Amino acid sequence: MSSLFKKIIILVLVGFSLHLAIIYFTPNLVFKYISKNWVEENMFNNSFARNLPTSDFTEVIRPSADLLYGGCGYDVTYFPLVIETEVPETYWSISFFSENTDNFSTINENSHNFGKLRIYLFGPESKPTKINDGFVVVSPTDKGLVLMRQFAGNRSNLDELYEVQNNLNCKLADF
């Protein structure tokens, strides 16, 4: 084999290995970067609310100016998380993101009409109990993010949407 051919093979193997390493590690590094201040700001298992995005909004990647964002970071290592909220009569969704930023579940107006909503989020090592009063979601990782989106549209119901957002409750289960 020629020396040039060996160098090309080595270069391709190194490039491929580097590519795989980037694909494997980047999502976890993104989550660690996003959540680095969550412990200090007491954002694990506590809800947060945000105003409508502007051009300076950087907390959600590629936000929509028509959506109101809220949610909570979660840590279900030892206990499940109970998420409670009233949902509006407009488009809304609650998406669950694992530690590697995979969106593993979404509940929206197609699964539940407006009104009171309760979701039980369990960790990967827990065994969900029988739940009669809400949805059960099982996370593939102990930590992650719950993101609630509400459609603001022409903003005629913005006060109601802010009230829904402010009433979002994330707390560890006590059963």
Image (spheres, helix red, strand yellow):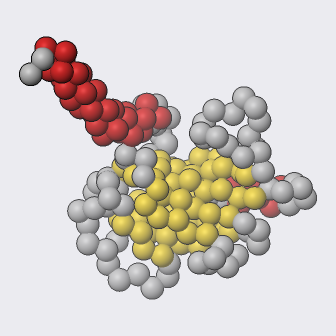
Quadrant of residue 93 in the image? Answer: bottom right
- Taking the spot 63% from the left edge, 76% from the top edge, the residue there is 110
Residue 173 seen in this snapshot: no
Q: Position of residue 112 (x, y in %)?
A: 62, 78
Which residue is situated farthest in the left direction here? 1
| Relative height, residue 126 to residue 165 (above, below) | below
- Taking the spot 53% from the left edge, 72% from the top edge, the residue there is 118
Which residue is situated farthest in the front direction here? 2
Is 59 on the left-hand or right-hand side of 56?
Answer: left
- Taking the spot 45% from the left edge, 85% from the top edge, the residue there is 132
Q: Position of residue 173 (x, y in %)?
A: 40, 65
Q: Position of residue 43 (x, y in %)?
A: 49, 42
Q: Position of residue 149 (x, y in %)?
A: 65, 56
Quadrant of residue 165 in the image? Answer: bottom right
Is 112 on the left-hand or right-hand side of 106?
Answer: right
Task: Return the residue nearer the eye: 54 or 18.
Answer: 18
